[in-house]
Amino acid sequence: MIWVNWRQHRSAAYGCLAVLIGLAVYAIMVGTSMRTAFGHDGLITCLASSKGAVGCPDAVMTFTNEFGSEVNIAFWSVALIVPGLIGVLVGAPLIARELEFGTWRLAWSQSVPRARWLAIKLALVTAGLVIVGAAMTAVITWYRAPMDRLTGHFQHNIYDFEGLVPTAYILCAFGFAVLAGLVIRRSIPAMIAAFLPWLAIRLVIEFVFRSSFMAPLTLTCGASNCQGNNGGYGISAVPPATGHIGDWVLSQTNRGFLYQPADRFWAFQSIEAGIFVALAAAALGIAVWLLHRRAA
């Protein structure tokens, strides 16, 4: 069974490996330069000072302008959909291919029951996807380490690549694709049918629900202390009253502002990853149930 699964999914495994290698090459090229500039620009001394990055805005601006270029932003903006693409490309053919080419007649007539056949396949492929997701996260976290010390982890395009959520995104897209493949019985349409709801859920959670995962804190301040803080992410969102790098400012009034402190990053990651893993488990559970009930 393991040998058969490897034969069926080795192309996907090689594709994931190619993505990892390409990502690692890019990360090493840019990340090495970033680390060199981080040391030469005096940012280590800056961060060690009592005021942190707020005390040396010129050095911070130079560094972020150099490594926050439009090319890098465009690259990571496109890469936001990579977890979903990996999940649907691996998941959709898992059952749909058997139905498309009629190989289910052989696969499901063996001594192994269909539900067990699918459970074994899901266990093996899911384990591989978890490894891929963890490896991607490790590479990106290493690459981003110098910039994270200046901006924190709550930025949109960074939060989605670090911590627990990248792997959860892959598993959710995979679960949707497996279920779609069983229902639609065609690989390409199943990929589209799985990717679109995955993307919609991601966008809704990111822009509607993420900020309310935990009740925001309120920081009151005088009008003079609130001047120049219009909310947002990263350096521009360091409240003068707290001075914490990476605090996520949600809204601001003349009396103060609502914000999520930077140290809630892992709590937010756990909540969001739990949502996507639960969706993946539900989709895969329905797929196993439907296959078990499916007429031969």
Image (tube, rainbow, N blue to C red):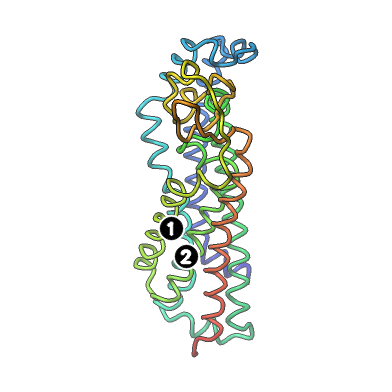
Q: Secondary structure at mark 2?
A: helix
Give the crowd class for mark 2: few <14, some 14-19, many >=20 residues within 10 Å: many
Give the residue at x 50% y 36%: 158
Q: Where does the N terminus fall, quadrant-wise?
A: bottom right
Count of labels in the image: 2
In space, the residues marked 1 and 2 are separated at their CA atoms by: 8 Å
Q: Viewer-proximal residue, 28 or 194?
A: 194
For marks 1 and 2 on the same chain, the one whose residue lies earlier in the sequence? 2
Q: Quadrant of residue 180?
A: bottom left
Under mark 2, the amino acid is: Phe
User: Which residue occupies the extreme bottom position in the image?
Assistant: 295
Q: Is residue 40 left or right of residue 81?
A: right
The location of residue 205, given as percent across then percent down, is 46, 51
Q: Which residue is mark 2?
A: 176
Q: Secondary structure at mark 1?
A: helix
**Residue 218 percent across, percent down from the top left:** 56, 33
Determine crowd level at label 1: few under 14, some 14-19, many 20+ residues with C-alpha closer than 10 A.
Answer: many
Mark sitting on residue 110: none
Residue 135 spot, x, y in % from top left:
59, 44
46 or 110: which is nearer to us?
A: 46
Q: Mark 1 belongs to which amino acid?
A: Trp
The answer to whether mark 1 and mark 2 are in CB contact below 8 A is yes
Q: Nearer the viewer, residue 53 or 76?
A: 53
| Residue found at x 53% / y 34% | 259
Give the residue displayed 47% in from the left and 35% down from the top: 250
In the image, residue 145 above or below residue 223: below
Q: Looking at the picture, does residue 202 appear above or below residue 218?
A: below
Give the x, y percent position of residue 219: 56, 29
Question: In the image, 219: left or right of 186?
Answer: right
Q: Which residue is mark 1?
A: 198
